[in-house]
Image: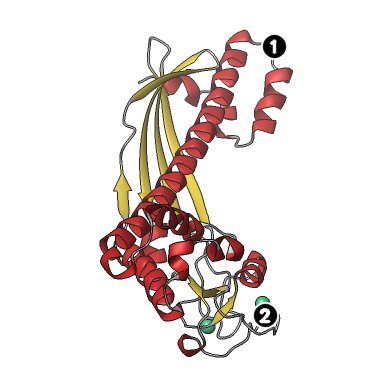
Amino acid sequence: MSNSKYNKYPYKYFETNHTFQYLFWSTENLNIKMEIAIMLNVKSFVKATVKERVRIFKENELSKQQAAYKDFMIKSNEKYNLSSDDIECLANILTSDEDHFDDLKRLETLQTLTIGEKYDLIENAQKLYYDNLPKYISWENEKTNFNCIYNDINFICSLKHNDTYFSLLRLNHTYKLPYLKEKFIGGECQICLEKFLEMSFVSKLRCKHSFHQKCLKIWLLEKESCPSCRSRVIKNMRFESFYNESIKDDGIVELSIILYTEATRLKC
Ligand SMILES: [Zn+2]
Ligand SMILES: [Zn+2]
C-alpha cells in the first residue's frame, strides 16, 4: 500500500482527463509524468471494465428472460401445442423492442390458437418472469481479483456490483401483448389517437393503460411516466461507479470498483 506516493501531488485531486493531460504536458519532471500516465490508465481501465460489465449484465438478463419465456411455453405446451421453432421465435419476439407484428403472423402453430389463448400465453409468460425477478437489492461479487494488463500496466481488480434496476422493474414493468378488445381500457392509443388493430402488439403499462409500442418508445425518450395517468414507468438502466486504487511496491495497481445499476430517477 503506497498510497502516500500519490498524496503529495495536488493533481491527484483534479478530476478530468483534460486536467491530467494539461499537467502532463506542462511538467518537466519525469516521475510526475509517469504517475500521471498511470492515473490516466487507471481511469481508462475502470471505464472500460465497468462498460464491459454492464454490457454482459444486460445481455445475461436478456437471455435469462428469453429462457424464462421458453420454459413457461414448454411447460404449458400440453394445452397450446406449439412447435419448438415457434416457441423459440415467440420468445425472441417478446424480448425485442420492435413490434414484429408480421413475424408473429408467420408462426403457424401459434395461429391455431384463439386470440384469447394467445393473449393468456403471452401475458402469463411475462408475468412469471417479472414475478421471479429479485425482490430486494442484489449484490454480485463475480469478478473478484482478476488480473490484467492494460496499456502496459498490471492491474489486480475486484468488482462489486449492486443492482436495484431489476427489483424496481419487477414492480413497475411493461407488458408486450397482442391487442384484444375485452382485455384493454379503451380501443385507441392515447398518444397518436389511432385505433388498435386486433392482434397487433401493444405496450400495456402497470397502470393498465396501453399504447402502440412505437408511440410509447418515442414518448419515453422524453418522459418517464404514463401519458394517460402520469404513473412512473421504468425505462432505462443507468449506472454509476466508484473506485479506490493503490500501487504495490512491485508496480501492480490494486483496484476495487463498486458499480451500481439502477433505474433512471424521475426528475420532478
Ligand atoms: Zn399510437
Ligand atoms: Zn397510466
Residue 101, numbered label: none
Disc 2 residue crowd, few under 14, some 14–19, many 20+, Cα 10 Å: some
Along the viewing direction, whichever of 237 and 89 lies nearer the viewer: 89
Q: Quadrant of residue 134?
A: bottom left
Image height check: is 35 above or below 189?
above
- Give SS at disc 1: loop
Residue at 39 percent of width and 76 percent of height: 117
Residue 84 shows in this picture? yes
Residue 266 in the image: x percent, y percent? 54, 69
Amino acid carrying label 1: it is Glu
**Count of numbered circles on the image:** 2
Would residue 164 appear left or right of 265 to someone viewing this image? Answer: left
Q: Is mark 2 within 8 Å of ligand 1?
A: yes
What's the amino acid at mark 2? Ile
User: In this rendering, would 81 be left or right of 210?
Assistant: left
Ligand 1 falls in quadrant: bottom right
Of tags 2 and 1, the one toward the viewer is 2
Q: Quadrant of the C terminus?
A: bottom right
Front residue of 141 and 210: 210
Q: Position of residue 31 (x, y in %)?
A: 58, 11
Name above or below for residue 67 compared with residue 4. Answer: below
State the residue in front, 234 or 16: 234
**Secondary structure found at label 2:** loop
* Above/below status of 8 relative to 70: above
Q: Using the image, tell me which numbered label, if any, was put on residue 28.
A: 1
- Residue 191 is marked as 2
Q: Quadrant of the N terminus?
A: top left
Residue found at x 66% / y 72% = 215
**Image location (x, y in percent) of residue 107:** 49, 61
Q: Earlier in the sequence, mark 2 or mark 1?
A: 1
Picture coordinates of residue 255 (x, y %)? Answer: 40, 28
